[in-house]
Image (cartoon, rainbow, N blue to C red):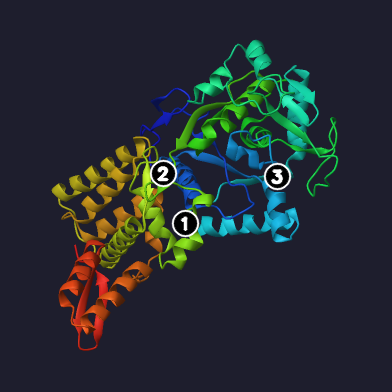
Amino acid sequence: MSLMADIYLFNSLTRKKEIFEPINSPNVGMYTCGPTVYDYATIGNFRSYLTADILYRSLQFFGYQVNYVMNLTDVGHLTGDNLGDADLGKDRVEESAKIQGKTAWDIAKFYTEAFLKDFEALNMKLPKVFSKATDHMTEQIELIKRLEVNGLTYKINDGIYFDTTQFEKTTGKKYGELSDLDKIKEGARVEVNPEKKNARDFALWKFSPKDVKRQMEWESPWGTGFPGWHIECSAMSMKYLGEGFDPFGKFRVNGEQSRTIDIHTGGEDLRQTHHPNEIAQAEGATGKPFVKYWLHTTFLQVDGKRMGKSLGNAYTLTDIEKKGYEPLALRYLFLNTHYKEPLNFTWDSLTSASTTLVKLREYTISFRDSNRTILSNEKGQKIEHFEEAFRKAIGDDLNTPRALAVLWEGLKSNIPSEDKYDMALSFDEVLGLGLNKISQVKLIIPEEISKLVAQRESLRKEGRFEDADKIRKTIEKLGFEIKDTPDGTITNTKKS
């Protein structure tokens, strides 16, 4: 695709939609905050990763060369983050290891592999680099040393902390500009450590507890311990995208210390403290802008409620599959709502997405083997219209719902079948629904539908035909139809 196409992205830093202008076109540096590998990633986590995947695909679709990096947090993310302070509590990986009777290294390896398996199942394109925090200890220590030289750190009993007040004095910038929480900007975060100079200050390096032997700990100029959660992303993104380190992991003090990164993405929760802390660390070390465009994905709700493990609704991809749904049905469901808009997950909505995906595959296969015909001027113009409409949809802050609508409009138009097939595969370079891999369409009946069909059968055997008919109507509303034959009941998707 042409680099001339305009792409507009909503920048969380400026709070407005801006035209995307890479710093060194056609090259783009892109970083995404990945999972903490102490447990299975939830479908809520994957909504954020899907935004990054669509952005990655879209940039490539428009002809950019993208250096895409995603981190894997395997140390330093503490449980206190759930309460609003990531410097408190227990290390999530080590705590999971203790509960499961395994080593922290085994836990990190197991859940990293599980994440990558789910990543592939959702047809997400692999980044150029998956960067693990434990593989970049040198870079993190060197970055903290640079902050120390710049007078932005101080030591207390449990670690080395970043001085947000001194950062503001030194750089002339306000800490927490990315956040939309006034408490971050005003320093009104709950005071939980009386030794900290300011409630907003955060840990760069945590000392190992004197009475506890950690499995993951390293020597540093300040003592044995482990990195704070935030420092890893600044260090790794600057290494791979910002040119902040030499090949030996030493921070560059002379010459160009850092090149601004084009795009950084993540969930909206990271916008409040984690990402502001990344900015403070990077810019405190280099004195240069850290990231040009910030993209944040809105939380996923479940049945109108927030998602959480304590609520029992933090579903994983395995939960989805156990219910009889394929992973790409979840991808289709996510594409139906803009990443900045709230999305309420329900099993009914997933059923609807699943049946629509089957119909999309049926359309695509039916057009695949058609004979080539000569295009009329009118039909040629229609194809150009659909292609331009799709480009505009994706270029308008990754508007996937509109892009899907354009795809369906094109498939139902009167352009030749073979051109519909080519168009579907072209658009799917961005949508990522795997339409080029279809050999035949296999109908997957979700568990919910199977239960309703069985319930209807029981009612019919009892002679309760009116109640059975009500269930039939419910099944039809969910996108399926049933036919009663001498050989039994047949379940299929409804025809458009």
Q: Position of residue 159 (x, y in %)?
A: 78, 30
Quarter holding the N terminus?
A: top left
Between disc 2 and disc 3, the foreground one is 3
Q: Secondary structure at mark 3?
A: loop
- Which label is found at residue 122? 1
- Calculate the distance from the C-alpha at mark 1 to the C-alpha at mark 2: 19 Å
In this rendering, the answer to whether 492 lies above or below 381 is: below
Q: Secondary structure at mark 2?
A: helix
Between disc 1 and disc 3, the foreground one is 3
In the picture of the structure, the residue carrying the numbered disc 3 is 91
Q: Quadrant of residue 32?
A: top right
Residue 283 visible in the current orientation:
yes
Q: Quadrant of residue 173?
A: top right
In the picture of the structure, the residue carrying the numbered disc 2 is 61
- Calculate the distance from the C-alpha at mark 2 to the C-alpha at mark 3: 40 Å
Looking at numbered disc 2 in the image, what kind of residue is underneath it?
Phe
- Calculate the distance from the C-alpha at mark 1 to the C-alpha at mark 3: 29 Å
